[in-house]
Amino acid sequence: MNTASSAANQDSSILAALTLRRVMVAIVLAVSVAAALNPLFVTPFIVLLGRTLVIAMVLLVVFIAAGLWRQTWLPMWMVRVFAVALAAPVATFVVYLPAVGGDVSAVLAHEGRVSGFILIAGCSLVIGPLLALGAMYRERDLQVRSQLLQFALERSTLERQALDARLQLLHAQIEPHFLFNTLANVQALVESGSPQAPAVLKSLIAYLRAAMPRLNDEQATLGQEVHLVRAYLELMHMRMPDRLAFDVAVPQDLMALRFPAMALLTLVENAIRHGIDPSEQGGRIDVGAVREGSSVVRLWVADTGVGMDDKAVPGTGLSNLRARIKAFFGDAARFELQEQSPHGLRAELVLPLSTDTAFR
């Protein structure tokens, strides 16, 4: 049963290896040999062509079958060349037998048939092994290219996995940072005895219930981020209604852009904490976005707070933000900070679009 199954598998492998390209190459060589030898033969060209075609097909099958033979005592290239070299005279002799009714002596006794056998077999012995070597060289070249492509694919997969792991680490670092800062705002209200504390705490709980499940969403969009930003600003407005005004204006056609969760929210939180809160008059926060051409999106968070402190050291939020947008959008992504006149700060994200980050 195993022997029959093995033979069937080998037959199917041979048929699969008989590609159209190989068959066409064999036919072209058979026609060329027949045309070259035709002036030397009295046999009609169609008969000569039939013999060279049969020999070419036999040698092709022998070449493929030899490649399927699993052995370790000889190099594969040597086995295939020897197989073709041995098959060439045998196949040539066999194609002469139908003309004499299978009588071997009739072939050997006829001088013209012996001369024809020598000519055809000689051509087969020269062309067959050379063609086999060329085919094996091409096979090896294809295998090398295939391995290089496989290595490149594996490298790309590993780089992608490393990038995902890095993004997850950055997410893990920034989530508690955001949460503790928000809870600190509520704590300040409670400690000061503000009558708004219960309402703010209630809004915070509702906000966190909606926000926390999205923090690790790998398919998060700018639209989801804008929703969280608006909810956060509304929460902060409840905390300081007389000191904070805001506007969020992001075009609807940008909402489907893939966008790392909390990236824009980090800028808004930073504007509240370091711009509006320290200012006696408070201020205004404007969040916006625009598409520049077909390959760049610019987002910004501008505030009219106290502005940039020359002695300030970048905190965890902004440091992680730079790393996250580089990991998510590539090295072409930029994070820029610039002073506003007469006071305040404008933070911008300049993001290139690619097939991985394009609109869904």
Image: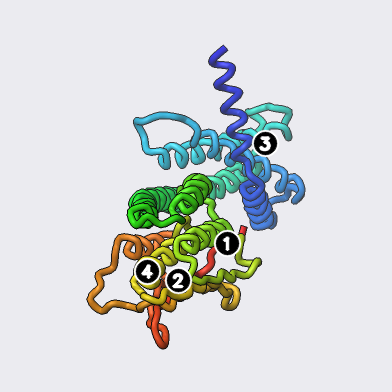
Q: Residue at x 26, y 79 (%)?
A: 310
Q: Is residue 300 visible?
A: no
Using the numbered discs, state the Cα–Cα distance from disc 4 to disc 1 in whole angstroms.
31 Å
Give the residue pinned by disc 2.
243
Q: Amino acid at mark 4?
A: Asp
User: Which sits earlier in the primary sequence, circle 4 or circle 2?
Assistant: 2
Q: Nearer the viewer, residue 164 or 142?
A: 164
Residue 187, horizontal then vertical, whole percent: 35, 52
* Circle number at residue 257: 1
Give the residue pinned by disc 3.
96
User: Is the residue 301 above or below the residue 193 in the image?
Assistant: below
Q: Is 220 on the left-hand or right-hand side of 168?
A: right
Residue 169, horizontal then vertical, whole percent: 35, 50
Q: Amino acid at mark 1?
A: Leu
The quadrant of the image that shows the C terminus is: bottom right
Q: Nearer the viewer, residue 167 or 171?
A: 171
Give the residue pinned by disc 4.
277
User: Which sits earlier in the primary sequence, circle 2 or circle 1?
Assistant: 2
Crowd band around label 2 with a 10 angstrom C-alpha radius: few (<14), some (14–19), many (20+) = some
The quadrant of the image that shows the N terminus is: top right
Q: Amino acid at mark 2?
A: Arg
Q: Is 345 on the left-hand or right-hand side of 126?
A: left
User: Is the residue 230 above or below the residue 10 in the image?
Assistant: below
Q: Residue at x 75, y 45 (%)?
A: 47
Crowd band around label 1 with a 10 angstrom C-alpha radius: few (<14), some (14–19), many (20+) = some
